[in-house]
């Protein structure tokens, strides 16, 4: 490769000969993923921001701004974990993340801003996929495509998808191209600029 061209591509990005990889790179930048700027000190994010492990919590890169949003989490390895939504005020260095968070925990407890609203008795094991839907009124959880019986109502303010892990738990997030079918009318989280 021409040294001048290599230098130019370093500054400008890939040339037209590398359009496919450049398009893929641009697409990755505009995808929702877990955010390295909003995570606990002992959290590790892998697989382009879709896998969380370590100890602590992380928020996603985008808030939920549309009326009906859906995302999915797969339990890759059991341990202590929680999934749901949280505000940027949540303390992500702790596990579990409780204050300013609305989550389903590994033991079936459903926690709304520090208060337990109920317990889901359906077992959740390694390999299970949990769907999460939010419509700015209710936060609902699904095992497979079956809605779980406890809902968190009346969540106020700007919230982000969130998870915490500890005790060797590993969770994989899917913010699009889901394995499960979202509930009717729900879709992937849209970035604010795509709503305009």
Image (tube, rainbow, N blue to C red):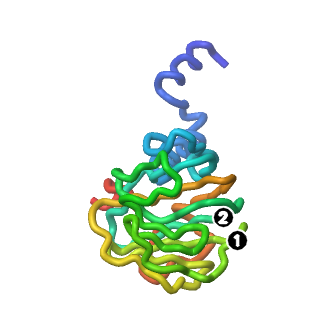
Task: Return the x and y of residue 137 as percentages of the image width and height.
Answer: 32, 76
Q: What element does badge 1 sit on?
A: loop
Pick the front one: 140 or 150: 150
Residue 5 or residue 136, whichever sits in front: 136
Residue nearer the viewer, 119 or 38? 119
Q: Secondary structure at mark 2?
A: strand
When asked about the image quadrant of residue 66, the answer is: bottom left
Q: Residue at x 53, y 44 (%)?
A: 23
Where is residue 85? Give x, y as percent: 42, 63
Against 175, residue 116 (above or below) is: below
Q: Quadrant of the N terminus?
A: top right
Q: How many marks?
A: 2
Looking at the image, residue 126 lies above or below residue 26: below
Q: Residues within 10 Å of mark 2 (few under 14, many from 20)?
A: many
Horizontal and vertical percent position of residue 95: 53, 53
Q: Pointer 1: what residue?
A: 125
Establish if 35 lies above or below 16. Answer: below
2 lies left or right of 25: right
Q: Which residue is mark 2?
A: 75
Can you say which quadrant of the picture contains the C terminus?
A: bottom left
Q: Which quadrant of the view contains residue 37?
A: top left
- Check contact, mark 1 vs mark 2: CB within 8 A: yes
Q: Counting residues from the N terminus, which is met first, the one under dot 1 or under dot 2?
A: 2
Percent of width and height locating residue 177? 57, 65
Side of 111 where 195 appears, left or right: left
């Amino acid at each position: 490769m021409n040294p001048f061209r290599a230098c130019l591509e370093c500054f400008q990005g890939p040339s037209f000969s590398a359009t496919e990889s450049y398009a893929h790179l641009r697409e990755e930048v505009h995808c929702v993923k877990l955010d390295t700027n909003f995570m606990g000190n002992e959290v590790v994010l892998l697989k382009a921001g879709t896998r969380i492990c370590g100890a602590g919590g992380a928020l996603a890169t985008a808030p939920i701004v549309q009326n009906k949003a859906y995302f999915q989490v797969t339990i890759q390895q059991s341990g202590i974990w929680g999934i749901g939504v949280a505000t940027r005020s949540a303390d992500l260095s702790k596990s579990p993340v409780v204050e300013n968070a609305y989550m389903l925990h590994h033991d079936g407890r459903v926690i709304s801003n520090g208060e337990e609203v109920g317990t889901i008795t359906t077992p959740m094991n390694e390999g299970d996929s949990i769907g999460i839907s939010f419509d700015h009124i209710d936060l609902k959880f699904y095992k497979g495509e079956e809605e779980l019986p406890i809902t968190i109502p009346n969540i106020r303010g700007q919230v982000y998808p969130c998870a915490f892990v500890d005790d060797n738990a590993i969770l994989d997030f899917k913010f699009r191209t889901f394995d499960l079918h979202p509930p009717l009318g729900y879709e992937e989280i849209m970035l604010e600029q795509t709503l305009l």
